[in-house]
Image (tube, helix red, strand yellow):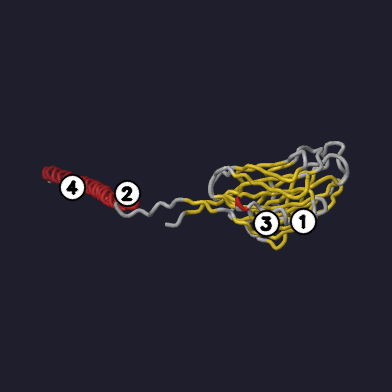
Amino acid sequence: MEPSSAPDRALSNSLNFSKKCGINSIRRFSRILAVTVLVVIMLTTVVGFSEINPVLQHHADKGTSGTGTSPPVRTLRTIAPSFYAVSNIPEAMISGNGSYTGLIATNLDDFIIVQIAYSEGTGGNLPDISNVRDTQSSSYSRIASASPGVAENFWEQVWTSRASSTTTSMNITVSPDWSACQKPCVTSIIISMTLSRYRDVAGVGSLAAVAPSNSSTSQSAKITPTQANSMLVELLSHGAYSNCGIDAPQPGAGQTSRNCFTATTERTELFDHTVSNAQTYTDSYSWALVEVQRGIYIELKGNSIPSPP
């Protein structure tokens, strides 16, 4: 019986070897199949993206460089500012370390011009104005000052700001710089204030100030706007007398008289007119009496808006 076991073992080994080879072949085939499937998936993805991407790119190009009709390019045009309202604050005498307050109403984005005129209440040098503020917590910027010097007895200043909200009443407070006043300083001042409001103002452009040392019956200033469609505003202050009507605007310049406020000591006047060209304008005024006088002339620049299609 033993001689027959050797062929059996050989047959068994041959079968095992064939079985192992078959299993290994199946494993190799499975691996090859898996790799092939992965390659096909990757190629499909790349090809699909390549086909989609030109479509997207072509779609995007139509919006930027296609042959369709582009919207018209709209240019900008400037509109002149417009006068809205003016308030005269009654004249008052302010003692040392005191301040001066006026009340106005505002609309959102009103451009506010504060014209301040003050003179000696007692003998001495005049204090400068240190700041102007309102109850909207807005601070004002001094645009111009008209005075030959602190030893002169009459000073005009203009401060501006923009309303941050709509209010039925808002306090504007002017604070003289009493502590820095050159000695000998006055112990009080006589002060008046005019508050004017304009709309569609982009900002302040050109300005001029007139502060002659000698009194006279007339005043003149040259101002060149920085742009067309601006508003020129003339703010005059001079000695008080009872008749404001004789200070008529100059018709040749198209000036409009907005107010004339006569107090006990100072008189303030407000004129304005729009200009169509950026050229030099001469504004002249005359009155009946020889007076000490000050004048501040400012350009209000208009807002730029798109032109109609």
**Percent of width and height locating residue 240:** 79, 51
Measured in 3D between alpha carbons, the distance from the residue under mark 3 to the one under mark 2, in whole angstroms, is 55 Å
Q: Mark 3 falls on what kind of element?
A: strand
| Residue occupying the point 88% across, 44% down | 122
N-term mark: 4 or 2: 4
- The residue identified by callout 3 is 258
- For residue 22, side relative to residue 293 (left or right): left
Circle 1/circle 4 CB separation < 8 Å: no
Measured in 3D between alpha carbons, the distance from the residue under mark 1 to the one under mark 4, in whole angstroms, is 125 Å
The answer to which of 302 and 217 lies nearer the viewer is 217
Q: Mark 2 falls on what kind of element?
A: helix
- The residue identified by callout 4 is 22
The answer to which of 299 and 237 lies nearer the viewer is 237
N-term mark: 3 or 1: 1
Circle 4/circle 3 CB separation < 8 Å: no
Q: Mark 1 falls on what kind of element?
A: loop
N-term mark: 1 or 4: 4
Measured in 3D between alpha carbons, the distance from the residue under mark 1 to the one under mark 2, in whole angstroms, is 70 Å
Circle 3/circle 1 CB separation < 8 Å: no
- Please tell me whether mark 3 or mark 1 is closer to you in this view: 1
N-term mark: 4 or 3: 4
- The residue identified by callout 1 is 243
- For residue 51, side relative to residue 234 (left or right): left
- Please tell me whether mark 1 or mark 2 is closer to you in this view: 1
- The residue identified by callout 2 is 65
